[in-house]
Image: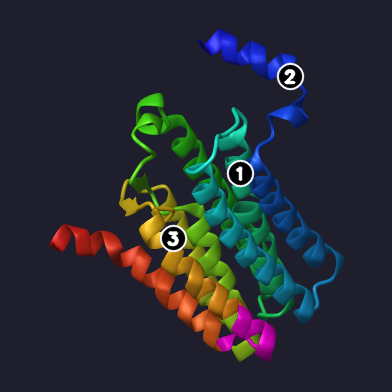
């Protein structure tokens, strides 16, 4: 069966293999790439905010990708495209934005730049390991059951949402001890992503739809007011609840 699949993949035009979920994954990757380009082109406050908003939009599209994949036929490329896109948008992009923010706006001394680079690099590596473990643990049996209900380790998408929301809040509200908090968050996320803690699959329709509506409401609020202070606080609160959710399941 594996040989037949490989033969089909190699004999078909790659464009014919692409399905709707794959297009969403490609869109996700392009948003992450654009966020990186924005920060590399200009380290202005506006460019950083726009890059962070793009990361949050990519997170919404990543959620849609999972929902669509459950309702229509998936291509053989699907899970690989999804992970590669996630690595760009939720691994590399947040780390680059964090590095730009820490070295240009948050008064990190020259001697600490190497430390900042090390933490940002650690976040990328831990995100890569998290995605690699997720892909390695995927099996035909779990796919036949409709997908896994739990993630092992904190999802990289959740980590990117947390970092993006905090950085937006820091830029908008000018939080003074932000550099220490941001580095602490990245360190905590490195531990959580590579841990064996089980988290509920937020792409479950019963969870994804309410969360998606909240994100849509917050995005409309941002577009109307052009301020992200209150939406960022709400996103941080939701992410904090998700981080603590395994404790609730243990105590029940």
Q: In the rendering, which numbered label is found on residue 21? A: 1
Residue topped by disc 2: 12
Q: Say which residue appears at 49% left-offset and 43% top-offset.
A: 71
Splitting the image into 4 quarters, where does residue 35 fall? bottom right
What stretch of residues is rendered in magenta? Answer: 220-229
Say if 44 sits above or below 212 in the image: below
Q: Say which residue appears at 36% left-offset and 41% top-offset.
A: 148
Q: CA distance from mark 3 to mark 2?
A: 34 Å
Is tag 2's residue or tag 1's residue first in the polypeptide sequence?
2
In the rendered image, the residue lying farthest to the front is: 72
Packing grade of label 3 (10 A; few <14, some 14-19, many >=20) is: some
Packing grade of label 2 (10 A; few <14, some 14-19, many >=20) is: few
Q: In the rendering, which numbered label is found on residue 208? A: 3
Could you tell me residue 205's position as x and y percent?
A: 41, 56
Packing grade of label 1 (10 A; few <14, some 14-19, many >=20) is: many
Name the side, left or right, on which 43 lies relative to 9.
right
Q: Is residue 228 magenta?
A: yes
Q: CA distance from mark 1 to mark 3?
A: 16 Å
Determine the secondary structure under disc 2.
loop
Determine the secondary structure under disc 3.
helix
């Amino acid at each position: 069966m594996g040989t037949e699949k490989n033969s089909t993949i190699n004999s078909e035009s790659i464009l014919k293999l692409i399905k709707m979920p794959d297009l969403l994954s490609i869109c996700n990757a392009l948003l992450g790439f654009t966020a990186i380009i924005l920060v590399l082109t200009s380290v202005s406050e506006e460019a950083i905010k726009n890059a962070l908003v793009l990361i949050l939009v990519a997170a919404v599209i990543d959620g849609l990708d999972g929902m669509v994949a459950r309702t229509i036929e998936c291509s053989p490329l699907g899970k690989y495209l999804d992970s590669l896109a996630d690595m760009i948008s939720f691994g590399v992009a947040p780390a680059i934005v964090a590095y730009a923010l820490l070295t240009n706006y948050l008064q990190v001394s020259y001697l600490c730049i190497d430390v900042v680079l090390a933490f940002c690099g650690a976040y990328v590596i831990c995100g890569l390991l998290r995605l690699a473990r997720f892909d390695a643990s995927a099996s035909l049996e779990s796919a036949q059951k409709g997908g896994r209900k739990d993630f092992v380790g904190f999802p990289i998408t959740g980590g990117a949402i947390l970092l993006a929301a905090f950085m937006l809040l820091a830029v908008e509200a000018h939080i003074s001890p932000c550099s220490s908090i941001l580095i602490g968050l990245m360190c905590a996320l490195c531990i959580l992503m590579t841990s064996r803690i089980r988290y509920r699959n937020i792409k479950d329709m019963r969870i994804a739809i309410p969360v998606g509506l909240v994100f849509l409401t917050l995005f409309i609020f941002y577009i109307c007011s052009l301020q992200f202070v209150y939406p960022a606080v709400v996103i941080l609160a939701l992410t904090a609840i998700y981080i603590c959710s395994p404790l609730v399941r243990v105590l029940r």
